[in-house]
Image (spheres, coloured by chain):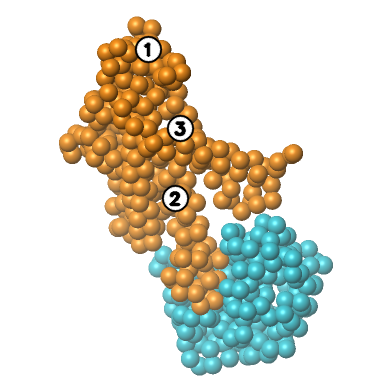
Chain colours: A cyan, B orange
Amino acid sequence: MLQANDIAWTYNGKTWLFQHKTVAIERGEVVGIYGFSGSGKTSFGKILARHMKPSEGTVTLDGVPLPMSGRSPVQLIFQHPEQAINPRWKMRRVLLESGPIDRDIFEAFGLQDHWLDRYPHELSGGELQRFAIVRAFHPEVSYIVADEMTTMLDSVTQQAIWRAFFRIARMRQMGMLIISHDFALLECLCDRVLDFETMKPL
Amino acid sequence: MRLNERQKMMVALFTSSLLLLLLISCGWLLSDDGLQTNGALKNEPPSLAHWFGTDWLGRDMFTRVLKGLQLSLGVGLLGAIIGVTLAFVLGMLAGTFGGWVDAVIGWCIDLFIGMPHLIFIILIAFSVGGGMKGIVLGVGLTHWPSLARLIRAEVQALRQAEYMLVAEQLGRTKWQMSREHLFPHLFPHLIIGFVLLFPHAILHEAALTFLGFGLSVQTPAIGIILSEALHHISTGHWWLTLIPGGVLLLVVKSFDEVGERLKQLLRPQTSQQ
């Protein structure tokens, strides 16, 4: 179980962006977090995936604090894939950074072999996001935090990506935290949706 | 045959590099005989025997110019290496550690950029006793700030880049991240900084020598040749200034060309042009 206990975050040590955020996600569970822009959802997601250290509180995985080095079992997928991929690397190298390419996942997301020899600027946003997702699914990953993962994509691509995403995640019994300000999307994807303000189910 | 943009750049790069190599190797191959004074051959205009003519002491200008260029290229090379190394080290330190390290280095950068650097170069060259050492140190120690500032900004931006965060999540160590993500990104800046500093250093060598703070009068350097030839402009001996000046311009322009082309070729966006 991935647990965030009483998490708080402040940029300057004086004003709190958020405080007392607690959530627990079981493996295989899909939890949605709904909130307005600027409410700190992204920072919360980054803390869960150990991109940032919380100002207060702890993140634990199965009762032990998340290891701060080595491969993280919690992977974050960003909103803008073009920023999450090194513009100087060809896509093959991007994927290999997380280990050998898993053909099942590769094909589930509809990736094509000839894209592997392209640079990021030669692919569309949807294609890049699929690469970013495939990269996140390394063998040790057990939780995925998806932060506005498909917000910048059209609805057809969104649907294709979520479908493949859920297939892989369910197959591997992964827990998921989906962060969005699109309530309809969360309602359709998640087992339960929490309001980021109160952390109560909506 | 139609060439695409990338091939045209390669051709320009190749031609410029070849020209520079040719000039350098000529300087080595030529004997020093042409540097001897010869009273019978004073002020000869360009001819087949003396391509660039002879000067008021009967020395062969072709030999002098090429030997001078070789010396200038040496000065440029050393000066540029010192400058780029300083810029890389200080920029990396400022960008990586931040805090007071960044503040001190930032203050030095502002100081060096704020002062006219020719004055700094003259002071440094003067204080170490002039000559080749003076010019190399003068150029190297004054030409790091703008590149250092660029490196610092790049390092700061890259440390926050999402793909660096992702690499950390994927278990890459700090060293691996620097080697795989950071350095390949900084490398083109260093190469281009180096190539662009090179001609700049040569011009400074010429300028310093021209002003009298550089090399001694008997060394065949472009600056000295130009400085001396200035006294002979009014006598109608045009080849004494025009040809060395033109060759210097050609070398500087070639280097500039090499730098610009490299800059374009190293960007991934140009890979399919």
Label 3 or label 1, whichever comes before in sequence order: 1
Q: Which amino acid type is marked by label 2?
A: Leu
Secondary structure of the residue carrying numbered label 3 = helix
Q: CA distance from mark 3 to mark 2?
A: 20 Å
Q: Nearer the viewer, residue A186 or A71?
A: A71
Q: CA distance from mark 3 to mark 1?
A: 25 Å
**Residue depth check, mark 3 versus mark 2: number of the one nearer the observer:** 3
The residue identified by callout 3 is B251
Q: Which amino acid type is marked by label 3?
A: Val
Looking at this rendering, what residue extends furthest in the top direction? B235
Secondary structure of the residue carrying numbered label 1 = loop
The residue identified by callout 2 is B190
Could you tell me which residue is drawn at 66 percent across and 78 percent down? A101
Q: Is residue B222 left or right of residue A95?
A: left
Label 1 or label 2, whichever comes before in sequence order: 1
Q: Tell me where residue B15 sits by quadrant.
A: top right
The residue identified by callout 1 is B44
Label 3 or label 2, whichever comes before in sequence order: 2
Q: CA distance from mark 1 to mark 2?
A: 45 Å
Q: Is residue B124 visible?
A: yes
Q: Position of residue A29 (x, y in %)?
A: 68, 88
For label 1, count other residues whose C-alpha is less than 10 Å away and answer few (under 14), some (14-19) or many (20+). Answer: some
Q: Are marks 3 and 2 on the same chain?
A: yes
What is the chain letter for disc 1?
Answer: B
What is the chain letter for disc 3?
Answer: B
Q: Are marks 3 and 1 on the same chain?
A: yes
Could you tell me which residue is drawn at 40 percent across and 68 percent down? A13
Q: Is residue A36 visible?
A: no
